[in-house]
Amino acid sequence: MRALGGLALLLVAAPLAAQEVDGPPLADCLARIKPEALARGVPEPLYDRLTAAMRSDVSVLGHLDDQPERVAPIWDYLALLVDAEKIADGKRALAEHREIFEKVSRAYGVDPYTLAALWGIEADYGKTIGRRMIFRSLATLGCMAPRRRDYFRGEFLAALRVAATGEVDAMKMRGSWAGAFGHPQFMPTVWFRTAVDFDGDGKRDTIGSMPDYLASMANYLKKAGWVPGQAWGFEVKLPANFNEALAGRTKKRALARWAALGVTRADGRPLTGGGEAGLILPAGRQGPAFLVFKNFDAIFTYNAATSYALAIGHLSDRLRGGGPFATPWPTEEKPLDRKGRKELQTLLLARGFAIGEVDGVIGKRSREAIRMIEAQAGLPQTGRAIEVVLEVLRRGR
Protein backbone atom coordinates (compact mmCIF):
# COMPACT_ATOMS: atom_id res chain seq x y z
CA MET A 1 0.00 0.00 0.00
CA ARG A 2 1.34 3.44 -0.93
CA ALA A 3 0.37 5.16 2.28
CA LEU A 4 -1.81 5.09 5.31
CA GLY A 5 -2.47 8.78 4.98
CA GLY A 6 -2.36 11.12 2.00
CA LEU A 7 -4.34 14.30 1.51
CA ALA A 8 -7.40 12.27 0.68
CA LEU A 9 -7.23 11.20 4.32
CA LEU A 10 -5.97 14.53 5.62
CA LEU A 11 -8.89 16.43 4.09
CA VAL A 12 -11.46 14.29 5.84
CA ALA A 13 -10.06 13.42 9.21
CA ALA A 14 -6.45 14.13 10.08
CA PRO A 15 -5.73 16.98 12.49
CA LEU A 16 -3.31 19.71 11.53
CA ALA A 17 -0.01 20.45 13.21
CA ALA A 18 -1.61 22.83 15.67
CA GLN A 19 -3.52 19.90 17.11
CA GLU A 20 -0.50 17.70 17.81
CA VAL A 21 -0.42 16.34 21.33
CA ASP A 22 2.89 15.98 23.15
CA GLY A 23 3.42 12.58 24.69
CA PRO A 24 6.35 10.86 26.40
CA PRO A 25 9.90 11.53 25.17
CA LEU A 26 11.18 9.08 22.56
CA ALA A 27 14.83 9.22 23.62
CA ASP A 28 15.15 5.56 24.69
CA CYS A 29 13.47 4.21 21.56
CA LEU A 30 15.44 6.53 19.29
CA ALA A 31 18.69 5.46 20.95
CA ARG A 32 17.86 1.85 20.04
CA ILE A 33 17.05 2.79 16.45
CA LYS A 34 20.15 4.95 15.93
CA PRO A 35 22.67 2.15 15.19
CA GLU A 36 20.45 0.78 12.43
CA ALA A 37 20.02 4.25 10.96
CA LEU A 38 23.76 4.80 10.88
CA ALA A 39 24.27 1.36 9.33
CA ARG A 40 21.89 2.37 6.55
CA GLY A 41 23.93 5.42 5.70
CA VAL A 42 22.25 8.14 7.74
CA PRO A 43 24.94 10.57 8.94
CA GLU A 44 25.09 10.77 12.72
CA PRO A 45 24.90 14.59 12.83
CA LEU A 46 21.73 14.46 10.71
CA TYR A 47 20.18 11.81 12.92
CA ASP A 48 20.98 13.76 16.06
CA ARG A 49 19.66 17.01 14.59
CA LEU A 50 16.34 15.55 13.44
CA THR A 51 15.68 13.60 16.63
CA ALA A 52 17.04 15.96 19.29
CA ALA A 53 14.70 16.23 22.28
CA MET A 54 11.93 14.64 20.22
CA ARG A 55 8.72 13.95 22.08
CA SER A 56 6.03 11.65 20.77
CA ASP A 57 2.91 13.04 19.13
CA VAL A 58 0.25 10.77 20.58
CA SER A 59 -2.45 12.32 18.40
CA VAL A 60 -1.27 10.23 15.44
CA LEU A 61 -2.07 6.97 17.22
CA GLY A 62 -5.80 7.59 17.06
CA HIS A 63 -5.80 7.68 13.27
CA LEU A 64 -4.80 4.05 12.81
CA ASP A 65 -8.50 3.12 12.95
CA ASP A 66 -9.89 6.34 11.49
CA GLN A 67 -9.41 6.04 7.74
CA PRO A 68 -12.29 7.79 5.96
CA GLU A 69 -11.93 5.75 2.77
CA ARG A 70 -13.16 2.82 4.84
CA VAL A 71 -15.48 4.36 7.44
CA ALA A 72 -17.21 7.31 5.74
CA PRO A 73 -20.19 6.74 3.44
CA ILE A 74 -18.95 7.02 -0.11
CA TRP A 75 -21.31 9.90 -0.88
CA ASP A 76 -19.77 11.91 1.96
CA TYR A 77 -16.29 11.11 0.72
CA LEU A 78 -16.97 12.10 -2.89
CA ALA A 79 -18.94 15.21 -1.94
CA LEU A 80 -15.79 16.60 -0.36
CA LEU A 81 -13.16 15.38 -2.83
CA VAL A 82 -15.03 16.07 -6.07
CA ASP A 83 -16.83 19.36 -5.53
CA ALA A 84 -17.22 22.55 -7.55
CA GLU A 85 -14.14 24.12 -5.96
CA LYS A 86 -11.92 21.15 -6.73
CA ILE A 87 -13.15 20.97 -10.33
CA ALA A 88 -12.57 24.68 -10.91
CA ASP A 89 -9.11 24.54 -9.34
CA GLY A 90 -8.20 21.52 -11.48
CA LYS A 91 -9.27 23.17 -14.72
CA ARG A 92 -7.29 26.25 -13.78
CA ALA A 93 -4.20 24.16 -12.97
CA LEU A 94 -4.44 22.34 -16.31
CA ALA A 95 -4.64 25.65 -18.17
CA GLU A 96 -1.84 27.35 -16.23
CA HIS A 97 0.59 24.42 -16.42
CA ARG A 98 -0.46 22.88 -19.71
CA GLU A 99 3.10 22.53 -21.02
CA ILE A 100 4.31 20.58 -17.97
CA PHE A 101 1.23 18.34 -17.92
CA GLU A 102 1.59 17.53 -21.61
CA LYS A 103 5.33 16.88 -21.36
CA VAL A 104 4.85 14.48 -18.43
CA SER A 105 1.93 12.81 -20.21
CA ARG A 106 4.01 12.16 -23.31
CA ALA A 107 6.83 10.70 -21.23
CA TYR A 108 4.75 8.32 -19.11
CA GLY A 109 1.53 7.75 -21.06
CA VAL A 110 -0.75 9.05 -18.29
CA ASP A 111 -3.28 11.62 -19.49
CA PRO A 112 -3.15 15.15 -18.04
CA TYR A 113 -6.67 14.90 -16.57
CA THR A 114 -5.82 11.89 -14.43
CA LEU A 115 -2.60 13.55 -13.29
CA ALA A 116 -4.49 16.71 -12.38
CA ALA A 117 -7.10 14.70 -10.48
CA LEU A 118 -4.41 12.83 -8.55
CA TRP A 119 -2.58 16.05 -7.70
CA GLY A 120 -5.84 17.70 -6.68
CA ILE A 121 -6.91 14.95 -4.32
CA GLU A 122 -3.47 14.30 -2.84
CA ALA A 123 -2.29 17.91 -2.46
CA ASP A 124 -5.25 20.15 -3.33
CA TYR A 125 -3.17 21.57 -6.18
CA GLY A 126 -0.40 22.53 -3.80
CA LYS A 127 -2.57 24.29 -1.22
CA THR A 128 -2.22 21.54 1.38
CA ILE A 129 0.45 18.86 1.52
CA GLY A 130 0.28 18.28 5.26
CA ARG A 131 1.77 20.14 8.21
CA ARG A 132 3.14 17.41 10.44
CA MET A 133 6.91 16.90 10.56
CA ILE A 134 6.96 13.32 9.35
CA PHE A 135 10.03 12.33 11.37
CA ARG A 136 8.09 12.91 14.57
CA SER A 137 4.96 11.14 13.30
CA LEU A 138 6.87 8.10 12.06
CA ALA A 139 9.05 7.90 15.17
CA THR A 140 5.94 7.96 17.34
CA LEU A 141 4.28 5.23 15.31
CA GLY A 142 7.49 3.21 15.08
CA CYS A 143 7.97 3.34 18.83
CA MET A 144 4.42 3.33 20.19
CA ALA A 145 1.88 2.06 17.64
CA PRO A 146 -0.19 -0.87 18.95
CA ARG A 147 0.37 -2.67 15.64
CA ARG A 148 2.50 -2.38 12.50
CA ARG A 149 5.28 -0.88 14.58
CA ASP A 150 7.96 -2.51 12.44
CA TYR A 151 6.42 -1.06 9.29
CA PHE A 152 6.45 2.49 10.63
CA ARG A 153 9.95 2.07 12.01
CA GLY A 154 11.08 1.07 8.54
CA GLU A 155 9.42 4.16 7.08
CA PHE A 156 11.09 6.32 9.73
CA LEU A 157 14.47 4.96 8.69
CA ALA A 158 13.59 5.52 5.04
CA ALA A 159 12.56 9.12 5.78
CA LEU A 160 15.96 9.72 7.35
CA ARG A 161 17.61 8.25 4.26
CA VAL A 162 15.55 10.58 2.04
CA ALA A 163 16.81 13.52 4.08
CA ALA A 164 20.35 12.17 3.81
CA THR A 165 20.25 12.31 0.01
CA GLY A 166 19.94 16.08 0.15
CA GLU A 167 17.44 15.94 -2.71
CA VAL A 168 14.63 17.38 -0.62
CA ASP A 169 14.85 19.81 2.27
CA ALA A 170 14.44 17.83 5.48
CA MET A 171 12.78 20.79 7.18
CA LYS A 172 10.10 20.75 4.47
CA MET A 173 9.35 17.04 4.85
CA ARG A 174 5.93 17.63 6.31
CA GLY A 175 2.87 15.59 5.53
CA SER A 176 0.17 13.32 6.88
CA TRP A 177 -0.13 11.64 10.26
CA ALA A 178 1.20 8.41 8.74
CA GLY A 179 4.33 9.91 7.17
CA ALA A 180 3.30 10.49 3.56
CA PHE A 181 4.91 13.70 2.29
CA GLY A 182 5.23 16.06 -0.64
CA HIS A 183 2.75 16.64 -3.44
CA PRO A 184 2.45 12.94 -4.37
CA GLN A 185 2.06 12.02 -0.68
CA PHE A 186 4.49 9.14 -1.05
CA MET A 187 5.60 7.13 1.93
CA PRO A 188 9.42 7.38 2.19
CA THR A 189 10.08 3.84 0.89
CA VAL A 190 7.83 4.57 -2.10
CA TRP A 191 9.74 7.78 -2.75
CA PHE A 192 12.90 5.73 -3.32
CA ARG A 193 11.13 3.37 -5.73
CA THR A 194 9.10 5.91 -7.64
CA ALA A 195 10.27 9.53 -7.40
CA VAL A 196 12.01 10.87 -10.51
CA ASP A 197 14.15 13.85 -11.46
CA PHE A 198 12.16 15.20 -14.40
CA ASP A 199 13.56 18.73 -14.48
CA GLY A 200 17.13 17.43 -14.80
CA ASP A 201 18.66 19.23 -11.82
CA GLY A 202 19.92 16.02 -10.21
CA LYS A 203 17.30 15.99 -7.47
CA ARG A 204 14.03 14.10 -7.05
CA ASP A 205 12.30 17.03 -5.44
CA THR A 206 8.68 16.00 -4.90
CA ILE A 207 8.15 18.98 -2.62
CA GLY A 208 9.41 21.96 -4.60
CA SER A 209 9.60 20.95 -8.27
CA MET A 210 6.35 20.64 -10.23
CA PRO A 211 7.97 18.66 -13.07
CA ASP A 212 9.40 16.24 -10.52
CA TYR A 213 6.27 15.67 -8.48
CA LEU A 214 3.91 15.40 -11.45
CA ALA A 215 6.29 13.01 -13.21
CA SER A 216 6.72 11.00 -10.01
CA MET A 217 2.95 10.50 -9.76
CA ALA A 218 2.83 9.51 -13.43
CA ASN A 219 5.75 7.12 -12.90
CA TYR A 220 3.89 5.51 -10.01
CA LEU A 221 0.84 4.83 -12.18
CA LYS A 222 3.02 3.57 -15.04
CA LYS A 223 4.77 1.12 -12.73
CA ALA A 224 1.34 0.06 -11.40
CA GLY A 225 0.27 -1.05 -14.88
CA TRP A 226 -1.28 2.05 -16.41
CA VAL A 227 -2.49 1.45 -19.99
CA PRO A 228 -2.05 4.59 -22.15
CA GLY A 229 -5.23 5.65 -23.88
CA GLN A 230 -7.54 3.44 -21.84
CA ALA A 231 -10.34 4.84 -19.68
CA TRP A 232 -10.40 4.13 -15.95
CA GLY A 233 -14.00 3.00 -16.41
CA PHE A 234 -17.50 4.41 -16.81
CA GLU A 235 -20.93 4.33 -15.20
CA VAL A 236 -23.37 1.67 -16.36
CA LYS A 237 -26.96 0.55 -15.85
CA LEU A 238 -27.85 -2.98 -14.81
CA PRO A 239 -30.86 -5.05 -15.79
CA ALA A 240 -33.46 -5.70 -13.11
CA ASN A 241 -32.50 -9.37 -12.82
CA PHE A 242 -28.75 -8.79 -12.59
CA ASN A 243 -26.82 -11.28 -10.45
CA GLU A 244 -24.82 -9.21 -7.94
CA ALA A 245 -22.44 -12.13 -7.38
CA LEU A 246 -20.86 -11.20 -10.71
CA ALA A 247 -19.68 -7.87 -9.29
CA GLY A 248 -16.10 -7.33 -8.16
CA ARG A 249 -13.18 -5.20 -9.32
CA THR A 250 -11.05 -8.24 -10.11
CA LYS A 251 -13.83 -10.30 -11.75
CA LYS A 252 -13.06 -8.99 -15.20
CA ARG A 253 -14.98 -9.99 -18.31
CA ALA A 254 -14.98 -8.82 -21.92
CA LEU A 255 -17.36 -5.95 -22.62
CA ALA A 256 -19.26 -8.24 -24.99
CA ARG A 257 -19.99 -10.59 -22.09
CA TRP A 258 -21.27 -7.73 -19.93
CA ALA A 259 -23.43 -6.59 -22.82
CA ALA A 260 -24.85 -10.10 -23.17
CA LEU A 261 -25.86 -9.88 -19.49
CA GLY A 262 -27.89 -6.76 -20.22
CA VAL A 263 -25.42 -4.16 -18.96
CA THR A 264 -25.52 -0.83 -20.83
CA ARG A 265 -23.84 2.50 -20.45
CA ALA A 266 -25.50 4.93 -18.06
CA ASP A 267 -26.97 6.87 -20.98
CA GLY A 268 -28.51 3.70 -22.38
CA ARG A 269 -26.06 3.20 -25.22
CA PRO A 270 -24.89 -0.38 -25.80
CA LEU A 271 -21.46 -1.51 -24.68
CA THR A 272 -18.89 -1.59 -27.45
CA GLY A 273 -15.13 -1.88 -27.68
CA GLY A 274 -12.48 -4.27 -26.52
CA GLY A 275 -10.78 -4.93 -23.23
CA GLU A 276 -11.94 -6.53 -20.03
CA ALA A 277 -13.60 -4.81 -17.11
CA GLY A 278 -14.79 -5.60 -13.61
CA LEU A 279 -18.07 -4.33 -12.21
CA ILE A 280 -18.15 -2.41 -8.93
CA LEU A 281 -21.18 -1.47 -6.84
CA PRO A 282 -19.67 0.90 -4.24
CA ALA A 283 -23.04 1.54 -2.55
CA GLY A 284 -24.79 -1.70 -3.40
CA ARG A 285 -27.32 -2.59 -6.06
CA GLN A 286 -29.41 0.55 -5.52
CA GLY A 287 -26.53 2.97 -6.14
CA PRO A 288 -24.40 3.80 -9.18
CA ALA A 289 -22.65 0.90 -10.94
CA PHE A 290 -19.37 1.09 -12.84
CA LEU A 291 -17.33 -1.03 -15.21
CA VAL A 292 -13.66 -0.50 -14.39
CA PHE A 293 -10.53 -1.34 -16.38
CA LYS A 294 -6.85 -1.89 -15.56
CA ASN A 295 -6.29 1.83 -15.08
CA PHE A 296 -8.75 1.80 -12.19
CA ASP A 297 -6.62 -0.95 -10.65
CA ALA A 298 -3.50 1.21 -11.10
CA ILE A 299 -5.17 4.08 -9.27
CA PHE A 300 -6.39 1.65 -6.60
CA THR A 301 -2.79 0.71 -5.73
CA TYR A 302 -2.08 4.35 -4.88
CA ASN A 303 -4.46 4.14 -1.94
CA ALA A 304 -6.19 0.79 -1.69
CA ALA A 305 -9.83 1.85 -1.38
CA THR A 306 -12.54 1.72 -4.02
CA SER A 307 -13.87 5.12 -2.95
CA TYR A 308 -10.43 6.68 -3.44
CA ALA A 309 -9.94 5.25 -6.93
CA LEU A 310 -13.47 6.25 -7.88
CA ALA A 311 -12.83 9.81 -6.68
CA ILE A 312 -9.73 10.07 -8.89
CA GLY A 313 -11.52 8.64 -11.91
CA HIS A 314 -14.62 10.78 -11.44
CA LEU A 315 -12.63 13.98 -10.91
CA SER A 316 -10.63 13.27 -14.07
CA ASP A 317 -13.89 12.95 -16.00
CA ARG A 318 -15.23 16.20 -14.53
CA LEU A 319 -12.02 17.96 -15.57
CA ARG A 320 -12.65 16.68 -19.11
CA GLY A 321 -16.06 18.30 -19.04
CA GLY A 322 -18.13 15.30 -17.93
CA GLY A 323 -21.09 15.57 -15.60
CA PRO A 324 -22.17 13.99 -12.30
CA PHE A 325 -23.20 10.36 -12.02
CA ALA A 326 -26.51 9.50 -13.65
CA THR A 327 -27.70 7.29 -10.80
CA PRO A 328 -28.06 8.98 -7.39
CA TRP A 329 -26.60 7.52 -4.23
CA PRO A 330 -29.09 5.46 -2.19
CA THR A 331 -29.58 7.99 0.59
CA GLU A 332 -31.84 10.90 1.40
CA GLU A 333 -28.98 12.64 3.19
CA LYS A 334 -27.27 15.51 1.43
CA PRO A 335 -23.55 15.60 2.27
CA LEU A 336 -21.84 18.97 2.33
CA ASP A 337 -19.04 20.01 0.03
CA ARG A 338 -16.10 22.05 1.30
CA LYS A 339 -17.99 25.34 1.11
CA GLY A 340 -20.83 23.89 3.17
CA ARG A 341 -18.47 22.30 5.66
CA LYS A 342 -16.71 25.59 6.24
CA GLU A 343 -20.04 27.32 6.86
CA LEU A 344 -20.98 24.54 9.27
CA GLN A 345 -17.70 24.97 11.16
CA THR A 346 -18.15 28.74 11.29
CA LEU A 347 -21.58 28.28 12.86
CA LEU A 348 -20.24 25.70 15.32
CA LEU A 349 -17.59 28.17 16.44
CA ALA A 350 -20.27 30.84 16.82
CA ARG A 351 -22.15 28.43 19.11
CA GLY A 352 -19.06 28.14 21.32
CA PHE A 353 -17.68 24.78 20.18
CA ALA A 354 -13.86 24.66 20.29
CA ILE A 355 -13.34 22.81 17.03
CA GLY A 356 -10.20 24.58 15.80
CA GLU A 357 -9.85 26.49 12.56
CA VAL A 358 -12.41 26.72 9.77
CA ASP A 359 -10.85 24.53 7.11
CA GLY A 360 -13.54 22.14 5.91
CA VAL A 361 -11.84 19.28 7.75
CA ILE A 362 -14.36 17.39 9.85
CA GLY A 363 -12.10 16.01 12.55
CA LYS A 364 -12.86 14.50 15.94
CA ARG A 365 -13.86 17.73 17.66
CA SER A 366 -16.11 18.77 14.78
CA ARG A 367 -17.79 15.35 14.79
CA GLU A 368 -18.38 15.54 18.54
CA ALA A 369 -19.92 19.01 18.18
CA ILE A 370 -22.16 17.83 15.34
CA ARG A 371 -23.43 14.94 17.48
CA MET A 372 -24.36 17.37 20.23
CA ILE A 373 -26.26 19.56 17.77
CA GLU A 374 -28.03 16.49 16.36
CA ALA A 375 -28.98 15.32 19.86
CA GLN A 376 -30.39 18.75 20.75
CA ALA A 377 -32.46 18.75 17.55
CA GLY A 378 -33.74 15.22 18.04
CA LEU A 379 -31.84 13.90 15.02
CA PRO A 380 -29.89 10.64 14.69
CA GLN A 381 -26.40 11.24 16.04
CA THR A 382 -24.18 10.68 12.99
CA GLY A 383 -21.41 13.20 13.63
CA ARG A 384 -21.33 13.84 9.89
CA ALA A 385 -21.38 17.03 7.84
CA ILE A 386 -24.82 16.81 6.24
CA GLU A 387 -27.27 19.44 5.11
CA VAL A 388 -29.85 18.84 7.85
CA VAL A 389 -27.27 19.74 10.52
CA LEU A 390 -26.30 22.88 8.65
CA GLU A 391 -29.97 23.90 8.43
CA VAL A 392 -30.37 23.41 12.19
CA LEU A 393 -27.39 25.66 12.82
CA ARG A 394 -28.66 28.27 10.37
CA ARG A 395 -31.97 28.42 12.22
CA GLY A 396 -30.14 28.82 15.50
CA ARG A 397 -31.92 25.89 17.14
Image: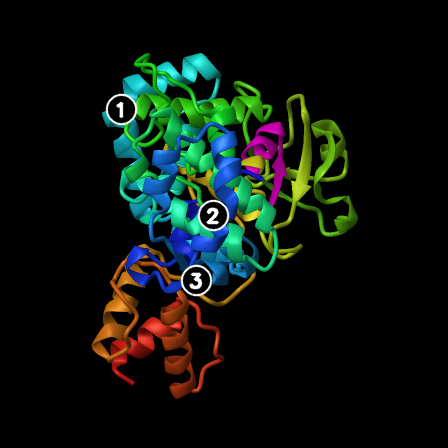
Colour style of the rendered protein structure: rainbow
Q: Taking 262 as reference, is 359 left or right?
A: left
Closer to the camera in the image, 112 or 320: 112
Q: Secondary structure at mark 3?
A: helix
Tag nearer the camera, 1 or 3: 3
Tag nearer the camera, 3 or 2: 2
**What residue appears at the point 36 percent right and 63 percent down from the top-left corner?**
22
* Residue 355 pos. (x, y %): 30, 70
Closer to the camera in the image, 366 or 336: 366
Q: Which residues are magenta?
A: 289-300
Label 3: few (<14), some (14–19) or many (≥20) C-alpha neighbours in 10 Å: some
Closer to the N terminus: mark 1 or mark 2?
A: 2
- Quarter of the image where one finds residue 113: top left
Label 2: few (<14), some (14–19) or many (≥20) C-alpha neighbours in 10 Å: few
Q: Residue furthest left?
A: 350
Magenta-colored stretch includes residue 292: yes
**What residue appears at the point 48 percent right and 26 percent down from the top-left corner?**
192
Q: Taking 50 as reference, is 35 left or right?
A: right
> Does residue 271 show up?
yes
Q: Secondary structure at mark 2?
A: helix
- Quarter of the image where one finds residue 235: top right
- Using the image, determine if residue 119 lies above or below residue 56: above
Q: Which residue is mark 1?
A: 97
Magenta-colored stretch includes residue 273: no
**What residue appears at the point 37 percent right and 32 percent down from the top-left corner?**
163
- Using the image, determine if residue 99 lies above or below residue 366: above
Closer to the N terminus: mark 1 or mark 3?
A: 3
Question: Residues under labels 1 and 2: Cα distance?
Answer: 46 Å
